[in-house]
Amino acid sequence: MGRLQPAVVDKEPDRLALAEEYDATPVNFAAGDPAEAILDATDGFGVDCGVEAVGYQAHDPAGQEHPEMVLDKLVEVVRSTGRIGVVGVYNPQDPGAATERAKEGRIAFDYGTVFDKNISLGHGQCPVKRYNHQLRDLIVRGRARPGRIVSHELPLEAAPEAYEHFDKRLDGWTKVLLHPAAA
């Protein structure tokens, strides 16, 4: 079996188009079960690894929050002895969470299958300062072009409006750069 290109699961058309620009296969979870689509694309074998980059505020296509949704789908598609990296945000407490347990930072997901399939879980926040210089150098040499994902550049005063548009997942709001006024 040849090397498969990465897949990106989302429901927002602008983000799916952006994934395609980066040579990833876009999977629209509003159009059907993403696990089924990925398993079909891999002839039922699943994938070696997956990344959970949403966090506890994952929403179904109707907009309902399901803290466990992405983890459960990854457990379904990652094959035995595979790996799942969790970089989505999971807070220790969130009074506004969708479930009582999630309000306490407790997320129930299919851990039994994780254990049975011997899937490795890794997680944590990015140590940004550790990589700043290396990332800067990649950008300076033209080997990384992060600007491709920037959808808006706004003054700092527009931050509340930008966050509102991004939180509502309005089309075209993928990454916003905020510029403070010149000192």
Image: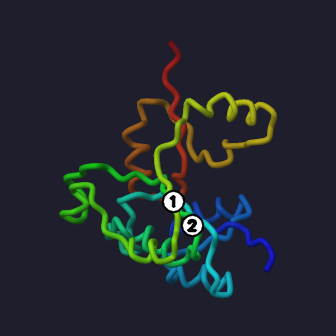
Residue at the extreme top:
183
134 in relation to 109, above or below: above
Q: Which mark is residue 13?
A: 2
Question: Toward the viewer: 110 or 59?
Answer: 110
Instruction: Give the mark, 2 or 1, whose residue is nearer the N terminus.
Output: 2
Find residue 65 and report its horizontal and vertical position in percent.
Answer: 32, 67
The residue identified by callout 1 is 171
What amino acid is found at the position of numbered circle 2 in the picture?
Pro
Q: Residue at x 55, y 35 (%)?
A: 128
Q: Residue at x 45, y 30 (%)?
A: 156
Mark 2–mark 1 CB contact (< 8 Å): yes
Query: Which percent across, then down, holds residue 9?
Result: 55, 69
Q: Looking at the image, which residue is at 68% across and 47% down?
A: 148
x and y percent of residue 133 in the render? Answer: 67, 28
Amino acid type of disc 1? Answer: Asp
* Looking at the image, residue 109 lies above or below residue 144: below
* Residue 44 in the figure: left or right of residue 137: left
Label 2 residue SS: helix
Rendered position, 170 above or below 65? above
What secondary structure is found at the residue carrying circle 1? loop
Residue 150, position in %: x, y? 61, 45
